[in-house]
Image (tube, rainbow, N blue to C red):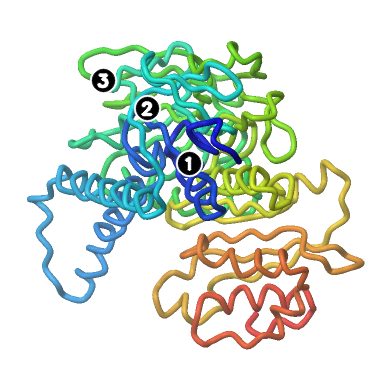
Amino acid sequence: MGNTYDYDVVVIGSGPGGYVAAIRAAQLGLKSCVIEKDKLGGVCLNIGCIPSKALIHQAEIFRSIPELQSMGVSVDGSNFDYSKVFAKSRKASDTVSRGVGYLLKKNNIDLIQGTGVLKGPHEVIVDNDKTITGNNIIVATGSRPRSIPGFEFDEQFVLSSDGALMLQQLPSSLIVLGGGFIGVEFAHIMNAFGVKVTIVELLERLLPLEDADSSDVLTRAFRRRKIEMYTGAKALSMKKESGKVSVLLEKKDGEKQSIEAEKVLVVVGRAPNTENIGLESVGISTEKGFIPVGNYYQTKVASIYAIGDVVSTPQLAHVASKEGEIAVEHMAGKNPVPRVDPLIIPSAVYCEPQVASFGYKEYQAQEQGISYKKAAFPYRGAGKSVAIEKSEGMVKVLYDPETNEILGAHIAGYDATELIHEVLLAKSSELLPSDIAEMIHAHPTLSEAVMEAMRSAEGWAVHI
């Protein structure tokens, strides 16, 4: 690509979109660099996916105490120290972040520490000082927790997801505003460690973007765990008094009720980091804060691409990574698919029970007038689920009534986030439910529930 520029690809941001894009560029023979103002790995590795999953793992160990006690083991939990749980989550983050540094070095990618701002179609200035030029630039600056008026973050009484992950001491009680995937994961963690948790969700159910049957499985489980839930409820206002927070709710029937807790966690989505990065200087305007992109994630300026949470696609780490790969493959002339197909993006929620899905939900199919049939199989019908005492859940598939094409799949239950990929691979390979139904699955495994759901679609489920 000539020697006109310092790099073939300049990436602003080192999250799962940015660092993967830089590595893929290097694999394709493009000289690349990453500009990062903070720690390598972005939100996901430092204050998102990785530390939260470390906390979830520790929470699940803690929740197993009653199982040990049922075997006659005496467990004294009186010396429990949450700061040690926190330390383990930070160690996981640091380890993975260092791993990214290793991968960048291995691929001969320059890491430039500092804040990158666009100055032209091929120019980025770092810390108002150093100019870096590139044949192409990728904006991968990620997102931050979105606040709501009247519930601004102070990280003492009102926590963002960042603040919740950095707690070294647990509150006695917590109100979670937002019943999406971040909200239910934190509710799971906090409840597991003995915090009294109340979830408030504006829409009619937990995980409103997931299929209703999956939401029902999770709601029943949370109810048994004594997690209080207000759905179809709006948080109107808040008062801080005597070391507590009081939140005034308007419930679905119009009744107002005040609820109290030691802290409030606000998790109502994430806002893209598109301010103060020089977009206006290159003539790019945002839409509702997001950067408009065409095919291959190109902005209106052909040499500048945008990926991940700054574009209006699902704000998921794996989506950002794939978008980064598509962008650099396009730069390298590899002719990739133009965009990530939203119907083959897996969704994964890591509470207990886990929830995972891809493709159409029933409500979407109904809204769009798409004909479908459905088949489901309960976890309890798979012997492995009974053996490991994880029999709560279900596998459900939506399919075309004429062609039998898989339209979507929904799994709620233990290890759902791993199981979903068998069905997604079948969908991506244009296989039918019959192909999974007829394939031998090892016994006993949870994946037999997937096989039986597909047999149910074919009309011959055995274990139900």
Residue lying furthest front: 3
Task: Report crowding for label 3: few under 14, some 14 to 19, many 20 or more residues within 10 A (C-alpha).
Answer: some
Among the 4 quarters of the image, the one containing residue 459: bottom right
Instruction: Tell me which residue sits at (46%, 54%) in the image.
Output: 221
Residue for badge 3? 244
Residue 464 is left or right of residue 169, and the answer is right
Mark count? 3
Mark 2 lies on a secondary structure that is loop
Instruction: Tell me which residue sits at (30%, 49%) in the image.
Output: 55
Dots 1, 2 in contact, CB < 8 A: no
Q: Position of residue 203 (x, y in %)?
A: 61, 32
Among the 4 quarters of the image, the one containing residue 410: bottom right
Q: CA distance from mark 3 to mark 1?
A: 50 Å
Residue 97's disc number: none
Residue 32's disc number: 1
Q: Amino acid at mark 1?
A: Ser
Mark 3 lies on a secondary structure that is strand
Residue 160's disc number: 2
Q: Position of residue 356 (x, y in %)?
A: 56, 56
Q: Amino acid at mark 2?
A: Ser
Report if residue 93 is visible in the image.
yes
Q: CA distance from mark 1 to mark 2?
A: 34 Å
Report if residue 142 is visible in the image.
no
Q: Position of residue 340 (x, y in %)?
A: 68, 47
Q: Amino acid at mark 3?
A: Lys
Instruction: Tell me which residue sits at (75%, 74%) in the image.
Output: 433
Mark 1 lies on a secondary structure that is strand
